[in-house]
Amino acid sequence: MIVPRLGVTIGDPAGIGPEISLLSAAETEFSGNCLVLFGDYDQLLDRATAIKLPFQFERITFEELTAGTPLPERCIVDVPAGEITVGTGSEASGKAAAQNIIKCAEACLRGALDAIVTAPINKKCFQAAGYHFPGHTEFLAHLAQTFSQTPDKSPEIAMAFLTDRLKVVLATIHDSMQTVIDTISPELIFRKLSIILTEFPKLRLPCGRVAVAGLNPHAGEEGLMGSEDLMNILPGIIEARKLFPKAVIEGPLPGDTIFFRAYRGEFDVVLAMYHDQGLAPVKLIGFGESVNVTLGLPVIRTSVDHGTAYELAGKGTARHESMNSAIRWALRLIEGRRLNHE
């Protein structure tokens, strides 16, 4: 039996990422799987001591991570960080978070690990450290390109949020509303639908019934409340129907009812037009359960659905259910991909 090997980046080390990573790794539910944390070993030991958590991790070097080489069930790739003040984000904590992600992504992209699970980062600290990306998703796409055999070709990605009863993919990610309006186009809608209908089957996720949300109230009411739905969304849907004739793709549908309809089982997945349109319903019904998945990467990546919560760091009160879900979904997607290859 092949034991799945998950790389877990601890996020911003000044936030709750280190402790939720440690807490989830200690869960008996994940016994029998290999969890490899990426972070400063001594700082993780200090954090475990602060929250009175037994520390049962072996220190390994990045060079020891090779495909097929046996690993301890719980270990830490020691990535030394600068001076970090728990509870206070800084340029140093942003740099440490980035270095952990880089090391974990490289190991995963060269086949030493089966998936990446990420704890939260602080975007301001991340960018202060010189990493000018809106978030994990865009940074991982950049790293996938950097470490690939074809570095001139950037992967086409999409951000998805998964719960058992509601699955949502975003057409745009960390964009202002004005940028969303300027960005939505038939080509974009077609590309995102293509990602859904290509990547979901690889992970054994259902996608036979796809719903596409409108941009305007009532999906534009046939042009009475804006022309974007008819001009910029519908043509992309029509093109996707031609390429994927077996899929049922409906839309654009009013954003105020589409998620309820998906939640009660009418659709397998919803393509939302912008960040808050898709995430508000997901977090309403699944906060702490929903998991962020990056579609289109050559590796599986899942993440928690919350932020760094500096105010809770080091106090032993941070909840780790979302990290549990991220690990659970990573294992589920690894198994789905394995079955798909058989």
Image (tube, rainbow, N blue to C red):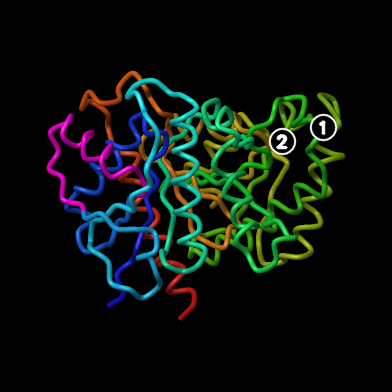
Quarter of the image that includes the C terminus: bottom left
Marks 2 and 1 close (CB-CB < 8 Å): no
Q: Which quadrant would residue 290 be assigned to in this image?
A: top left
Q: Which residue is mark 1?
A: 182
Which portion, as a residue range, is magenta?
38-57
Residue drawn at 81 percent across, 24 percent down: 225
- Name the foreground residue: 261 vs 202: 202
Judged from the image, the secondary structure of the residue bearing numbered disc 2 is loop
Residue 258 x, y percent position in the rendering? 60, 37
Vertical relation: 330 (above or below) 175:
below
At label 1, counting other C-alpha atoms closer than 10 Å, the crowd grade (few under 14, some 14-19, many 20 or more) is few
Residue 264 x, y percent position in the rendering? 47, 43
At label 2, counting other C-alpha atoms closer than 10 Å, the crowd grade (few under 14, some 14-19, many 20 or more) is many
Q: Farthest residue in the bottom direction? A: 342
Vertical relation: 13 (above or below) 118:
above
Q: CA distance from mark 2 to mark 1?
A: 15 Å
